Image: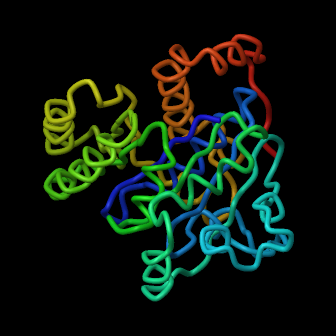
C-alpha cells in the first residue's frame, strides 16, 4: 500500500476536496483506495455523509486504542463505493491531541494502524489537519509521499515554509516524496497567473503541472456528498482532478514495481463511481 498525505497547515486550501476527489480518481483507475480522515473537524467524513453509513468508530480510536470492537482497524472501515473505503474522522479536541502526545511511539500511531490493513489496499490517502501538531506528524510518518495543496494567493506561499520545515524533519527519519499542486486558480486574472509562476519557481520539480481551477461544481459536489466525477463528470473540476490523478500516478507508480504491475493490468477506461 502506497500512502499519500494531502496536507497544508492553512485551512481553505482545497485539502479535503483534493483528498476526496484524488481518492475517487484512483478508484476509477482500478485501484483499491483507503481514505483516512485525520482532520479534527472530520471534513472528509462530512463530505461523504458518514452519518448515514453506520460508522462505529474513528481513526482516533485506532490511534488511542479505544472503541475498536475486536481491536482491529478493519472493524472501523466504512465502504463508500466500489474500491473506496473510509477510515472516518470525528471531532478531535486539544485534550485528545494531548492524550495522543503522551502515548508511546506518539508519531508512529497512524503508521501502526495502517499496517493492519495494508494488504487490502493499493493506496491510502490521508486528509491531514490544517495544523502542524502531532496528528500531521503521524500522517507524514505514515506516508510515502505528501501532496501539498497551495491556494493561488499571496499569503499561501508565506505560510508554507513552516510546513516544509516539518516535512524536511520527517525526511531525515524516512523517505518521503514531496509534491505541490496549485488550487483555486483563476487564470483570468494577472494576479493568479503571477502567483502561479512564483509557486513554480519556489517548488521547482515538486510542483505538479496540473492546476485545480476555481469551479463552483466542486463546492456543489461536496454539498451533495459526491465526488466530482459522479456529480459533474464534464466539469472543469472533474477534468482537473482526472489530470491530477494521472500526473501523480505517472510520477509515483513508475518507480514502484508492485503498483506498476497493477497499473499495467488495470482497465485504462477505469471504473465507475456510485
| Residue occupying the far bottom of the picture | 95
Residue 250 vertical placement versus 180 (above, below)? above
Which residue appears farthest toward the front when viewing the image? 104
Q: In screen coordinates, is 159 left or right of 111?
A: left
Horizontal side of residue 249 vs 211, given as left or right: right
Residue 144 lies, with reference to residue 251, above or below; the image says below
- Residue 92's place in the image compared with 129, above or below, is below
Residue at the image point whose x is 21% and y is 43% from the top: 192
Judge by depth and name the residue closer to the eye, 225 or 71: 71
x and y percentages locating residue 80 in the rendered image = 79, 54
Residue found 55% across the figure and 20% down from its top? 253
Where does residue 215 sit, x and y in percent of width and height?
Answer: 46, 49
Q: Quadrant of the N terminus?
A: top right
- Residue at 69% x, 60% y is 87
Percent x, y of residue 37: 59, 62
In this figure, which colouring scheme has been used for the structure? rainbow
The quadrant holding residue 52 is bottom right
In the figure, residue 181 lies in which quadrant? top left
Horizontal arrangement in the rendering, residue 110 relative to residue 152 (left or right): right
Which one is in front, 109 or 39? 109
Decide which of 94, 39 is in the foreground and name it. 94
Residue 174: x and y in percent read 39, 39
Count of marks, rendered view:
0
- Residue visible at 75% across and 51% down? 85
Front-most of residues 222 and 217: 222
Amino acid at each position: 500500500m502506497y500512502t499519500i498525505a494531502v496536507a497544508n497547515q492553512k485551512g481553505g486550501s482545497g485539502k479535503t476536496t483534493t483528498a476526496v476527489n484524488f481518492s475517487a480518481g484512483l478508484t476509477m483507475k482500478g485501484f483499491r483506495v483507503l481514505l483516512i480522515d485525520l482532520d479534527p473537524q472530520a471534513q472528509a467524513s462530512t463530505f461523504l455523509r458518514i452519518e448515514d453509513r453506520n460508522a462505529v468508530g474513528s481513526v482516533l480510536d485506532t490511534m488511542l486504542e479505544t472503541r475498536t470492537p475486536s481491536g482491529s482497524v478493519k472493524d472501523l472501515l466504512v465502504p463508500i463505493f466500489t474500491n473506496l473505503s473510509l477510515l472516518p474522522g470525528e471531532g478531535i479536541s486539544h485534550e485528545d491531541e494531548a492524550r495522543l502526545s503522551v502515548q508511546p511511539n506518539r508519531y508512529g500511531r497512524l503508521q501502526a494502524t495502517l499496517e493492519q490493513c495494508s494488504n487490502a489496499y493499493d493506496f491510502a490517502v490521508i486528509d491531514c489537519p490544517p495544523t502542524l501538531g502531532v496528528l500531521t506528524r503521524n500522517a507524514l510518518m505514515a506516508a510515502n509521499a505528501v501532496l501539498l495543496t497551495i491556494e493561488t494567493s499571496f499569503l499561501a506561499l508565506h505560510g508554507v515554509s513552516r510546513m516544509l520545515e516539518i516535512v524536511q524533519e520527517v525526511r531525515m527519519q524516512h523517505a518521503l516524496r514531496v509534491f505541490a499542486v496549485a488550487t483555486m486558480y483563476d487564470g483570468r486574472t494577472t494576479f493568479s497567473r503571477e502567483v502561479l509562476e512564483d509557486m513554480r519557481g519556489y517548488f521547482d520539480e515538486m510542483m505538479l503541472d496540473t492546476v485545480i481551477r476555481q469551479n463552483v461544481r466542486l463546492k456543489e459536489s461536496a454539498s451533495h456528498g459526491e465526488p466530482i466525477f459522479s456529480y459533474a463528470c464534464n466539469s472543469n473540476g472533474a477534468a482537473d482532478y482526472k489530470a491530477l490523478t494521472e500526473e501523480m500516478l505517472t510520477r509515483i507508480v513508475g518507480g514502484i514495481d508492485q503498483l506498476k504491475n497493477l497499473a499495467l493490468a488495470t482497465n485504462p477506461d477505469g471504473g465507475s463511481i456510485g
